[in-house]
């Protein structure tokens, strides 16, 4: 666990867990697009019958015919696109809510520390510095955490899913 994640409260940890869940859904949708490309091209341009990749062939039902692909594949693609849209929306909403909570928490921490400072130290630091921390630095810190750390995790899950697709297809 990183120090940033360890310092989060219980409610914020739940939000991060939900964000990771939606990130996993986004990664799976991206992998589904990767898996659907081959059958989609086969359905569009014809060709031989569909065959499952080697590792999947023993466990999968018989592959569909090209006619079955032409009938079902557009609906599957629309379904995956719809799921990805919902996941992106939920991810964005959760990320914004987490960002607001983190900004509020950082601003409260700055206020608390400013209030316990002796008056002479506060005069030396200046109210402008404290105000800059609250107004500019706290939102910048939450943006760095939400957009940096969480997006790195989301993109890492996407990369793992796509590498899994490559391995599955014997690339």
Image: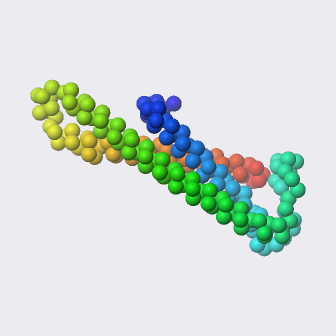
The residue positioned 74% from the left and 49% from the top of the image is: 167
Q: Where is residue 104 in the image (x, y as percent from the top left)?
A: 34, 40
Q: Where is residue 133 in the image (x, y as percent from the top left)?
A: 26, 41
Vertical position of residue 127 compared to residue 48: above or below = above
Q: Closer to the camera, 68 or 48? A: 68
The answer to whether residue 153 is seen in the rendering is no
Residue 105, picture quadrant: top left
The residue positioned 82% from the left and 47% from the top of the image is: 55
Q: Closer to the camera, 12 or 164? A: 12
The residue positioned 78% from the left and 73% from the top of the image is: 45
Q: Where is residue 84 in the image (x, y as percent from the top left)?
A: 60, 57
The residue positioned 11% from the left and 33% from the top of the image is: 123
Please give left or right for residue 110 compared with residue 59 in the image.
Answer: left
Vertical position of residue 49 compared to residue 157: above or below = below
Q: Residue furthest bottom?
A: 45
Vertical position of residue 168 compared to residue 82: above or below = above
Label total for image: 0
Please give left or right for residue 36 compared with residue 49 in the image.
Answer: left
Q: Position of residue 110 (x, y in %)?
A: 27, 35
Please give left or right for residue 123 compared with residue 49 in the image.
Answer: left
The answer to whether residue 113 is seen in the rendering is yes
Query: What colour-coding does the image apply?
Result: rainbow
């Amino acid at each position: 666990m990183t120090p940033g994640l360890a310092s989060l409260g219980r409610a914020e940890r739940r939000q991060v867990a939900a964000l990771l869940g939606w990130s996993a859904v986004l990664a799976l949708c991206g992998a589904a697009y990767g898996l659907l490309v081959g059958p989609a091209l086969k359905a569009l341009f014809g060709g031989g019958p569909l065959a499952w990749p080697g590792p999947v062939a023993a466990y999968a039902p018989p592959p569909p015919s090209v006619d079955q692909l032409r009938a079902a594949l557009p609906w599957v693609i629309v379904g995956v696109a719809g799921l990805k849209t919902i996941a992106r929306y939920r991810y964005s909403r959760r990320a914004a809510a987490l960002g607001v909570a983190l900004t509020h928490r950082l601003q409260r921490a700055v206020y608390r520390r400013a209030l316990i400072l002796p008056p002479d130290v506060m005069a030396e630091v200046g109210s402008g510095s404290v105000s800059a921390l609250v107004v500019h630095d706290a939102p910048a810190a939450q943006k760095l955490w939400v957009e940096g750390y969480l997006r790195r995790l989301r993109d890492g899950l996407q990369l793992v899913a796509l590498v899994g697709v490559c391995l599955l297809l014997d690339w």
